[in-house]
Every structure is written in structure tokens, then in C-alpha cells.
Image: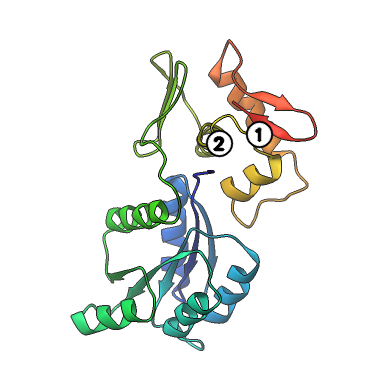
């Protein structure tokens, strides 16, 4: 299983949406943003997401309707509903239409991150809390990777690629999968982004080499 989380933020308050997206990207997630319910349904119809952070009080197509639509088509994403109304009745209503979790505004960013991670874990089989391959260790929770006890100075994207490769358990991961799971919607599929990131990652990992290039297929550890 590839573990990097893909998150869709559906929030009509653009400044809040972009602020949250920036914070989640710093946490190693791949994040896309849309500002209304119709755009959310368009995006989820063509893209894979582990978690949809959904503002309930959207203009046009209400968040409740977006949630019902996602449930209706069997979309696998977990839905975390946000709302300015935090009463028990509101929470019961939100959960009753199919949301997986409910968070009232204003919220603490750390709590939002924790809830997203918890929902993503429920979306698929659990992975070990720390990924290990020989003398290489990666802890997704603390965002720390070490080799032979030495902490690796990895950028967020380098960490994401390493996490994806280690989570694959020796299986080959294609460049397309790395791009889809590790980058957001603005990544250009025709660039050398993945190749350049792999090259930098190899240098930082040092010898003996760990990342194998499988011709016409991708990469594996």
C-alpha cells in the first residue's frame, strides 16, 4: 500500500483553504483545493483522495449534498466535515448523512491533522508506525528518517518519495504512482520532477545504494 495521503479541501473561504493546504503539505500530504461543491464532485470523479475535508456551509451546492453524492457513488474517500455550527444536533445530522468525522470551526490545526491521519488509516490496511529496511528507518509521525543512526536531511518531497517506496514493501512503484501520490494537482506529468527527486534522494541516502531503477517500470527499495 502507498501511504502518502491525498487530501481534497472543499472550502469557499479561499484564504482559509489555502492556509490549511499549505500546512497539510508541510505535514507531507498531497493536497488539492476547490472552493465550491460542484467543483468538489468534478474533482472526486476523476481523482483518488483518501480524505475529503468538506465545509458544510458551501454556497450553491451545500456540503450535505456533496457528502450524500460521494456516499451515493461509493467514493472511497473518508469525509471530514467542517462547520461553524458545533451543536450536538449539527454533529448528529452531519454524521447521519454519511460523514466519517465532524470538526467545528474554529479548530486547532494539530487536531485537524490528527483527525485526517486517523481517517486515512481507516481507509486501508494499517502499516507499521515506523517503516524499516535494513539500517534505514522512517517515522511518518515525526517526519524523521535515519540511516545507520544518522538523520537524513530530506525535503518534504524527498521524504514523501522515500515513504512511498518503503511502504510498498519491495514492490515496484512507477513514476506515475509517485507523481500521483506525492504531488498535488499542479505537478506537470511531463517534467523530470520524479527523476530529479530520486536522484537527490539517492545522494542523501549514501552507500550502499538502496533505490533500484527497474527499466520501463519504476523504482523500488
Farthest-out residue, bottom: 60
Left or right of 87 in this view: 217 = right
Give above or below for 65 relative to 151.
below
Tell me whether the residue at label 1 lies in contact with that at label 2, contact meaning CB atoms closer than 8 angstroms. yes
Q: Which of the two residues, 220 or 115, is positioned nearer the viewer here?
A: 220
Residue furthest to the left in view is: 88
Q: Residues within 10 Å of mark 1 (few under 14, many from 20)?
A: some
Q: Residue at x 26, y 80 (%)?
A: 92
Give the x, y percent position of residue 194. 67, 38
Circle 1 sits in a helix, a strand or a loop, which is it? Answer: loop
Q: Is residue 146 visible?
A: yes
Asked if one can make out residue 36 in the rendered structure from this viewpoint, the answer is: no
Percent x, y for residue 133? 48, 22
Q: Residue at x 44, y 48 (%)?
A: 125
Mark 2 = which residue? 168
Q: Residue furthest top?
A: 208
Picture residue at 37% right of the left edge, 72% below the top: 81
Amino acid at each position: 500500500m502507498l501511504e502518502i495521503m491525498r487530501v481534497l479541501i472543499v472550502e469557499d473561504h479561499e484564504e482559509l483553504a489555502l492556509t490549511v493546504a499549505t500546512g497539510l503539505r508541510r505535514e507531507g500530504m498531497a493536497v488539492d483545493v476547490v472552493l465550491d461543491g460542484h467543483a468538489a464532485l468534478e474533482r472526486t470523479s476523476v481523482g483518488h483522495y483518501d480524505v475529503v475535508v468538506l465545509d458544510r456551509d458551501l454556497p450553491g451546492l451545500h456540503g450535505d449534498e456533496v457528502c450524500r453524492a460521494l456516499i451515493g457513488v461509493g467514493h472511497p474517500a473518508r469525509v471530514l466535515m467542517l462547520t461553524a455550527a458545533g451543536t450536538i444536533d449539527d454533529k448528529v445530522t452531519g454524521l447521519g448523512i454519511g460523514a466519517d468525522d465532524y470538526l467545528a470551526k474554529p479548530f486547532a490545526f494539530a487536531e485537524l491533522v490528527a483527525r485526517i491521519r486517523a481517517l486515512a488509516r481507516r481507509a486501508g490496511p494499517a502499516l507499521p508506525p515506523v517503516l524499516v529496511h535494513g539500517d534505514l528507518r522512517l517515522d511518518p509521525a515525526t517526519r524523521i528518517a535515519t540511516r545507520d543512526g544518522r538523520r537524513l536531511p530530506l525535503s518534504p518531497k524527498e521524504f514523501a518519495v522515500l515513504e512511498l517506496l518503503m511502504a510498498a514493501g519491495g514492490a515496484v512503484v512507477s513514476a506515475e504512482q509517485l507523481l500521483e501520490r506525492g504531488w498535488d494537482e499542479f505537478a506537470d506529468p511531463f517534467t523530470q520532477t520524479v527523476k530529479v527527486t530520486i536522484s537527490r534522494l539517492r545522494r542523501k541516502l549514501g552507500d550502499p545504494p538502496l533505490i533500484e531503477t527497474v527499466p520501463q517500470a519504476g523504482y523500488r527499495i
